[in-house]
Image (cartoon, helix red, strand yellow):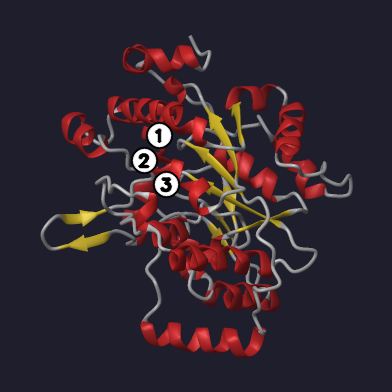
Amino acid sequence: METTVTYPNIQSRLLMHRVARSQPTAPVQPSPKVLAVTRWLERKLLGLDTTVVPLDRPVFLLSMPRSGTTMLQDTLCAHEGIAFVNNVMNRFPTTFCLVESMRKGLGLDFEAQRYIGDSVTVSPGSPSGGLTFWGDWFHLDPFSLAYRPIQASDFSDKDIERIHDMVKQVIWSYGQPWRRFFMKMIAVYPYAELIPHLFPDARILHVVRDGRQAANSMCKQLDRWIEHQKANGLYRRDPVHGDQFFVPYPRFPKLAENAERFGLHDVRTAAHLWNDAANHLRTVRDGFRHFYQVRYEDILANPEHELNGILEFLELPPASPENRNFWDRVKRIGHVQHVNRYAQFDVVEEICRDNLEYYGYL
């Protein structure tokens, strides 16, 4: 079984097939020869100049998986003042300006399920979580469950300058007037305290969902993601450890231990992960100069009110009335194509009681 993909033209089918199949996972990077050619073309053809691009109050969406981040990301990225990493940029992070220019110029497109059995439809220009960007910046192995300690001192001035330049390249790709950079950050949740070090004027938006629902949904998503990787051959073949799959969980220190103890697909592993993330955020959030928190359930109950509060925090004007993409997405919030039947709430409550009470879920 594979994801359903539709292409509008023959060039899209020929050139975007691999992107369509691999977009929700950690893509394999092009060969050094291909990279050298595309970098040369990018410099010669585009005249890329990031010295004129401002890096102003970048926005980072912080959350656990299955907490409404895709819904909120897609809505905010439809705002005319936002620049974001899309699926094509995530697939080609070293020469994404050239590839994005080719996508637009050649009309390269597709529509596909994000992964097998998912109700979310994506395209090359859809917002991406930027896994390859974060993996590059933080030197993370997407196929490993191990936690890797990282400190501010691990980033040299040159490292930070390179990160800033990549962000400016994303903004440059959208042209003038210059936009504000936005990125969802699930993979580096364990290192959230480093964001102000890398981006001192960052705006950090945190979304939380009821841990009982989130833990169940994380297990459901994990099964689908691994099924997708098996069907499309996207896993890593390791002669020692066997086939390794990308797991869409942030690598908090006890993840590997709990996966070994309970099983990776067990709701207790997901519940402990949700609880570890909540504890971590409560520890580090006072170090954020600009921080805003919203519950997923409150967004569903009153989308326009909550989005107005978010935009005000981000110091962005309301979306233009003519921005149909934004307002159509707002209207779709809360409308789902499936019904979930989750269980083991008592198990999750036992693990997460303090934080469930803290966020008002008990």
- Residue pushed farthest left? 240
Residue in front for this viewpoint, 328 or 190: 190
Neighbor class of circle 2 (other Cα within 10 Å; few <14, some 14-19, many 20+) is: some
Please say whether residue 345 is visible from this viewpoint. Answer: no
Tag 1–tag 2 contact (CB < 8 Å):
yes
Dot placed on the residue nearer the N-terminal end, 3 or 2? 3
Residue in front for this viewpoint, 233 or 85: 85
Quarter-wise, where is residue 6 in the image? bottom right
What is the number of the mark on residue 188? 3
Q: Residue at x 51, y 84 (%)?
A: 39
Q: Position of residue 311 (x, y in %)?
A: 74, 38
Residue picked out by circle 2? 222
Residue picked out by circle 1? 218
CA separation in Å, label 1 and label 3: 17 Å
Q: Residue at x 33, y 49 (%)?
A: 150
Is 232 above or below relative to 267? Answer: below
CA separation in Å, label 1 and label 2: 6 Å
Q: Type of residue at label 3? A: Val
Is 13 above or below relative to 353? Answer: below
Is 222 above or below relative to 86? Answer: above
Residue in front for this viewpoint, 68 or 81: 81
Circle 1: element type: helix
Dot placed on the residue nearer the N-terminal end, 1 or 3? 3
